[in-house]
Amino acid sequence: MKITVIPDIHADMQRLNWSLNTSSTSSDLFFLGDLIDAGKGVKKPNDLGVLKKVRELISTGKAKAILGNHELNAILFHRISKDYLVPMRPHTDNNMKQHKSFIKAFGIQSPEALDWTLWMLDTMPLWHEVDGLRIVHACWSDSAIETVKKRRPDGYLQVEDLDEIAAKKTRFAKAVELLTSGPEFSLPDGYSFEDKNGKTRKEVRLKWWDPEVTSWDEACLSVPDTEQLPKTKLPLKALKEIYDAEASPALVGHYKMKGAPHLQSSNASSLDFPDTPCLYAWRGEKSLVSENLIATN
């Protein structure tokens, strides 16, 4: 089976067109989520154009798509909590900014916004596993997937799950967050770091795809100065999220990786490189290979 895996589009019609033009016509297409919400580098955001094209591909059986954190955030943003009678995702300045291009296209809680986010909910599961290839937006976690499967065996969330997911308190809700946003852990007491914007943070993202990392300073993502991190061993809870070196290959998006597109390990990798469009052409291999990672020149 031939599969082309396409990472985060973020309302960029030019990126989507490059991805489709570069894909083999004999491949099944799998989108890794985050179709919406343009980032800083998108000159002409087109949430509607991207959604319509992907919907057409899905409806004709040419593609499938995974639920990303931006789709999940949008679903919550445009719905009112039955428990608290406020938006499930707060309409803060930061959340509005992140969702700006979608809001410009569809408004807030409009019929169009509700229709598109319901389409996302109905069409985009949390994961796919096809012929030995694992596809998820942010992290393949066996424990999180098993938790979700107990209620939603096919990985498709339902409207009645949303209030619980928004509250982020239950095991089910935390499993959904892990799959869509990746593992984050609080640093030991007394430690923090400054992010690229100078904000002090005490929680770090984990390089879950690297089986060789064991300590805080080795395992953390998006930390400008790793000297601010402890060199002590990760706690057992974090180590359990490190992907097994013998597990089936897994591909994700989400992480806004720096530099030229590259694989992070032989069996798990993010394809999300905002500065350079890329995709992965999987041909049944049990280990990921660099020659199947295709990027713009």
Image (cartoon, helix red, strand yellow):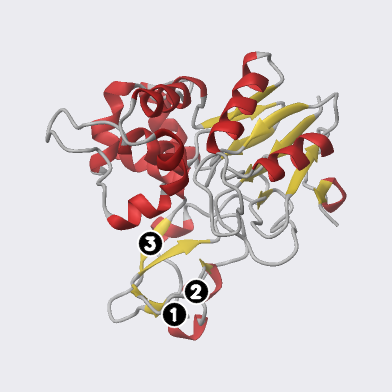
Give amino acid for label 2. Val
Name the residue: 39% across, 44% down. Answer: 177
Return the mark for residue 229. Answer: 1
The reply to whether the C-beta atoms of the residues labelled 3 and 1 are less than 8 Å apart is: no
Residue 11's x, y, as percent? 57, 42
Q: Is residue 286 visible?
A: no
Q: Earlier in the sequence, mark 3 or mark 2?
A: 3
Give amino acid for label 1. Leu
In front of the other: label 1 or label 2?
2
Return the mark for residue 223. Answer: 2
Q: Nearer the viewer, residue 264 or 262?
A: 262
In front of the other: label 3 or label 2?
2
Residue 275's x, y, as percent? 68, 60
- How far is the residue under mark 1 from the one under mark 2? 9 Å
Question: SS class of the residue under badge 1?
Answer: loop
Name the residue: 24% across, 32% down. Answer: 163
Name the residue: 40% across, 25% down. Answer: 112
Task: Estimate how packed mark 1 is, as few (under 14), some (14 to 19) or many (20 or more) residues with alpha carbons within 10 Å.
Answer: many
Return the mark for residue 185. Answer: 3
Q: Nearer the viewer, residue 98 or 158?
A: 98
